[in-house]
């Protein structure tokens, strides 16, 4: 078996637009999205660069397969690959070239012929890139997209990744958040608005529980401080002295991981359930973002 890497968008000047691209017809392991540009004045930070990519969406004949904002894609990369995505030139030098590469995965492991997008017909599979022109913090930006396909593979399932914006619940304390029903769930991510800063212990959400048909499962009661320990598997906790170097990233995201060994034996099964929820103990009455990594049959 062979893999094939091919450009589907090459050195395209970033614009404020939603650009749609037809993807290859062979089974796809993953896409590689790269944005590059030049430092403006002193440095372009990771947060500033991510801010120019609003959303990446992949759909097949109108059915969503992948729909995440850039910050959550960065976190998902940490989860899938066990390390932070490549960001070059962590230096505060004006006009120095910087490039950030993000992977759009369709399996829990890359290059897995059993877990990927299946073969499609021409025009069925569409990539949509929602981007903004980098203004005063990142000059001369371009984007590049490459597809990694596996001709001849017959994958049985693929990774489906979606997000949901959660409104402020109206108060603090325990609130239930619906989990999609029908697939196996590998991971649920939370990107919180409030994370502790100077002289603060405040988290947007303090504690997480999973309820399947109103019965506790997997995460019976997990304080966010314990979930932070899990993040050591996915990121390098390197503190930099320059903003361009950044600190621990993603510094406001945690995972409820149901597949810690990526072998499927602990997956959250939702098929046949009447209800499946995360019970979140809010410490701050504010909006959050939740994102899901599910296994869907091809």
Image (spheres, rainbow, N blue to C red):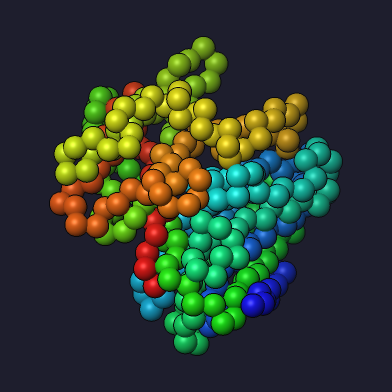
Pick the front one: 236 or 16:
236
Image point (50%, 68%), residue name? 114
Query: Where's residue 101, x and y in %?
Result: 67, 55
Q: Which image quarter: residue 280?
A: top left
Query: Where's residue 277, x and y in %?
Result: 25, 42
Can you say whether 59 is above or below 293 in the image? Answer: below
Can you say whether 51 is above or below 244 in the image? Answer: below
Image point (19%, 52%), residue name? 273
* Side of 277 where 32 appears, left or right: right
* Side of 12 where 103 appears, left or right: left
Pick the front one: 215 or 53:
215
Image point (55%, 16%), residue name? 198
Q: Which image quarter: residue 33?
A: bottom right
Which quadrant holds the C terminus? bottom left
Query: Where's residue 214, x and y in %?
Result: 16, 39
Which residue is situated farthest in the bottom direction here?
Answer: 122
* Side of 240 where 178 appears, left or right: left
Q: Is residue 169 visible?
A: no
Query: Where's residue 240, x and y in %?
Result: 73, 29
Which quadrant holds the N terminus? bottom right
Q: Is residue 33 visible?
A: yes
* Side of 259 where 214 appears, left or right: left
Which residue is situated farthest in the top direction here?
Answer: 199
């Amino acid at each position: 078996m062979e893999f094939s890497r091919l450009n589907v968008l090459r050195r395209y000047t970033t614009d404020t637009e939603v650009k749609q691209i037809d993807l290859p017809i062979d089974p796809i392991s993953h896409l590689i999205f790269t944005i590059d540009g030049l430092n403006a004045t002193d440095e372009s930070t990771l947060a500033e660069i991510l801010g120019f990519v609003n959303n990446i969406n992949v759909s097949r004949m109108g059915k969503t397969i992948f729909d995440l904002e850039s910050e959550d894609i960065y976190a998902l990369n940490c989860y899938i690959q066990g390390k932070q995505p490549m960001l070059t030139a962590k230096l505060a030098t004006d006009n120095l070239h910087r490039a950030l590469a993000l992977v759009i995965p369709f399996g829990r492991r890359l290059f897995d012929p059993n877990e990927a997008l299946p073969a499609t017909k021409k025009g069925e599979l569409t990539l949509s890139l929602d981007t903004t022109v980098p203004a005063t913090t990142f000059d001369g930006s371009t984007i590049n997209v490459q597809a990694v396909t596996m001709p001849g593979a017959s994958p049985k399932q693929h990774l489906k990744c979606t997000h949901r914006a959660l409104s402020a619940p109206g108060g603090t304390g325990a609130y239930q958040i619906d989990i999609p029903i029908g697939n196996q769930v590998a991971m649920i991510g939370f990107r919180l608005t409030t994370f502790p800063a100077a002289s603060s212990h405040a988290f947007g959400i303090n504690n997480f529980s999973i309820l399947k048909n109103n019965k506790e499962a997997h995460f019976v009661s997990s304080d966010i401080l314990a979930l932070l320990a899990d993040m050591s598997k996915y990121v390098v906790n390197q503190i930099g002295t320059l903003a361009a170097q950044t600190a621990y990233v993603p510094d406001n995201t945690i995972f409820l991981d149901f597949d810690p060994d990526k072998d499927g034996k602990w997956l959250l099964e939702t098929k046949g359930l009447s209800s499946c929820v995360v019970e979140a103990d809010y410490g701050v009455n504010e909006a959050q973002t939740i994102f899901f990594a599910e296994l869907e049959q091809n």
